[in-house]
Amino acid sequence: MADREQTLTEFIIQEQRRFPHATGEYTALLNYIRLACKRISFLIGRGALGGVLGSTGAVNVQGETQARLDVIANDIFLRTSEYGGHLAAMVSEEMDGPYTIPPEYPRGKYLLAFDPLDGSSNVDVNVSVGSIFSVLRAPDHARDPAAADFLQPGTQQLCAGYAIYGPTTMMVLTLGRGVHGFTLDRGMGEFILTHPDLRIPEAASEFAINASNDRFWEPPVKRYVAECLAGRGGPREKDFNMRWIASLVAEVHRILVRGGLFMYPRDSKDPARAGRLRLLYEGNPMAMLVEQAGGAASTGTGRILEVVPADLHQRVPVILGSRDEVARIERYHAEHEQGLDRPFTSPLFNERSLFMPT
Ligand code: MN
Ligand code: MN
């Protein structure tokens, strides 16, 4: 890396120069996404002063309460990205079906899937939130891209990333060659490369899971968590720390910076759903980032990126982070399938534990 300070735009241009026939369309598309994230960052930074906190009182297509900022951030993404002529259509957490580019703008060859505001229930309490995006190629024949055109496995993503609106605003991005983090210089209004080539350590001693769902977890997940909680005296022979922010972007950001494991596994709470997180605009982009940083992202039984979507808002179990830990949970799933797992019990566990193994 050069000593010279590099902006996000310069970084994308540099990546694009590696491909002799590149047209620059891609650079421009990412510039619009960057602009959308800067606009959202500005609004979130104003907080209560911007008059945008609180709920709309409405419920989105997911059956979730919409925060006012969910709607505003979705609108910012649409209005900012539709203009440039690089997109054919967009889908988002906040919209039922695909949004086609209005006729007054040229239409391009890319598809954008996004979660405009991830962790929005955290905004009111001033905890980090973010925006997540994933770029796919529109099928050649698609003059008017339909929902089916978005149903590509995550391995087809051209690029993925997120913005995190925390104490600093950052953009973290992969174009398929590593993961790179850029910090917003608020004075200058530019993202500057500050975290080149993020790598996730293979081993971990931190895990994050919503423990209130303990009773709904699958046996392999119960086993994993019970073993972590048993600490030094248990089969793992070391102590673990637990984290839970309830904001996917913030969880993944922590893992990219210092390792660990994040789980939102399949649970039996609502058997109609295969998990909590959405495949197209949460699971896939995060899985691409984590794999590009040397980690792993699994449903428990296979790579998230290989799941073939059947629905725009399909949910997926998510287990991601340090490679060794993800491999262990996959092994526990395989052993459970074969009836080879023995529920873990230790003298440290008693009937008062919240985390009784099955
Ligand atoms: Mn989300
Ligand atoms: Mn959201």
Image (spheres, helix red, strand yellow):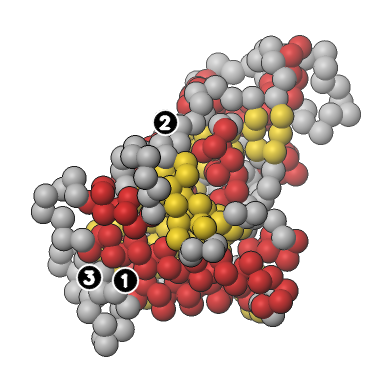
Picture residue at 56% right of the left edge, 76% below the top:
71
Q: In front of the other: label 1 or label 2?
A: 2
Query: What residue is disc 3 on?
Result: 108
Tell us which disc is closer to us: 3 or 1. 3
Residues under labels 1 and 2: Cα distance?
A: 31 Å
Evaluate if marks 1 and 2 touch, with contact meaning CB atoms under 8 Å apart: no
Q: Is residue 188 left or right of residue 150?
A: right
Few, some or many C-alpha atoms within 10 Å of disc 1 (few <14, some 14-19, many ≥20)? Answer: many
Q: Is residue 351 visible?
A: yes
User: Residue 223, image x and y in percent?
Assistant: 65, 25
Q: What distance separates the C-alpha of mark 2 from that of mark 3? A: 32 Å
Amino acid on which the number 2 mark rests in the picture:
Gly
Q: Which residue is mark 2?
A: 294
Q: Earlier in the sequence, mark 2 or mark 3?
A: 3
User: In this rendering, would 328 be left or right of 296?
Assistant: right
**Residue 313, position as x, y percentages in the image:** 46, 61
Which image quadrant is residue 111 in? Answer: bottom left
Task: Say which quadrant the C terminus sits in.
Answer: top right
When the figure is inspected, residue 118 is found, relative to residue 19, above or below; the finding is below
Q: Amino acid at mark 1?
A: Ala
